[in-house]
Image: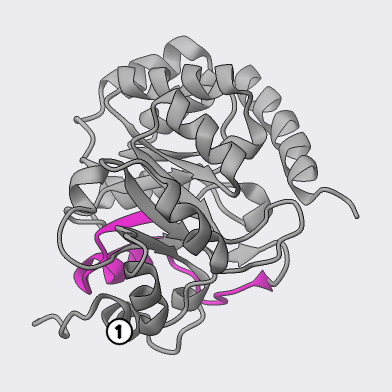
Amino acid sequence: MPNILDEIVAAKRIELAESKTQISVADLESAATNQPRPLNLSGALLGGGVRLIAEVKKASPSRGLLMPDFDHVKLAETYARNGAAAISCLTDLRFQGELGFLQQIKETGASQRAPVMRKDFIFDPYQVIETRAAGSDAMLLIVAILEPTQLKELLDAAQEYWMQCLVEVHDEEELETAVEAGAEIIGINNRDLRTFTTDLSVTERLAPLVPRGKQIVSESGIFTRDHLRQMNKVRVNAVLVGEALVTAPDVGEKVRELTGQKAPTT
């Protein structure tokens, strides 16, 4: 069986090499330092119950186009108005994402007070600076594509720009690597990125192994309020949801269903 994750990373390396020829590190650093201080992701995930990180997602490699009338700014605004604690923005081309989507969400203020996280396949310090230069408050790091030394280097680089990282794991070994590197927000992906199969029991198995004091985010396969109750039983602080939201007939209503919020007043 082909390793889908390896294919994605190989494509990303080519894309990154092209980016480096177009924008210098110095120019990115200048743009990054001119950004306002990022919003605090871990603070947004505090509180009772399971918080929602809502994902701006147009398509997936397995299912193709998910939202034909996709409008990233409007979507982020809908998420924030209806109770999402934070917003994840897919910026990988394979998912029909763009870093410009995230930049526009931040520039227009569509996310309101919700931190915005870049979700991509990040393995190079250049991408960290690029992420902050676009205005992102936080970013995803995937342990499966990183050596332990790389993970620590990227966490340190993010900290230089006051960004927090959601560090994603899928098994016990990756969890140990994340904790040893100093990750504070642990994302448990119920989807195996090598095969794209999904199983919520991954979170149920790994969450009890996460040291106290760390925040836990369950990712993938979350579709209903019952799923949030299931995650709450294993000390999960938040869930990251994309497909269930962008395929819903009424996105705002689906966000409120998952967050338990009432309809906003106009």
Front residue of this view, candidates 234 and 90: 234
Front residue of this view, candidates 66 and 18: 66
Q: Residue furthest bottom?
A: 249
Q: Position of residue 214 (x, y in %)?
A: 31, 42
Residue drawn where x is 54% and y is 45% of the image: 169
Q: Residue furthest top?
A: 26
Q: Amino acid at mark 1?
A: Glu
Q: Quadrant of the C terminus?
A: bottom left
Residue drawn where x is 64% and y is 38% of the image: 144
Magenta-drawn stretch contains 68: yes
Asked if one can make out residue 159 in the rendered structure from this viewpoint, the answer is: yes
Magenta extent? 64-87
Asked if one can make out residue 101 in the rendered structure from this viewpoint, the answer is: no
- Determine whether, in the image, residue 18 is placed left or right of residue 34: right
The residue wearing badge 1 is 257
Answer above or below: position of 144 versus 221: above
Q: Secondary structure at mark 1?
A: helix
Magenta-drawn stretch contains 65: yes
Residue drawn where x is 24% and y is 60% of the image: 85
- Determine whether, in the image, residue 88 is placed left or right of residue 69: left
Q: Position of residue 230 (x, y in %)?
A: 39, 75
Front residue of this view, candidates 100 and 156: 156
Crowding near the residue tagged with mark 1, few <14, some 14–19, many ≥20 C-alpha atoms within 10 Å: some
> Which quadrant would residue 131 be assigned to in this image?
top left
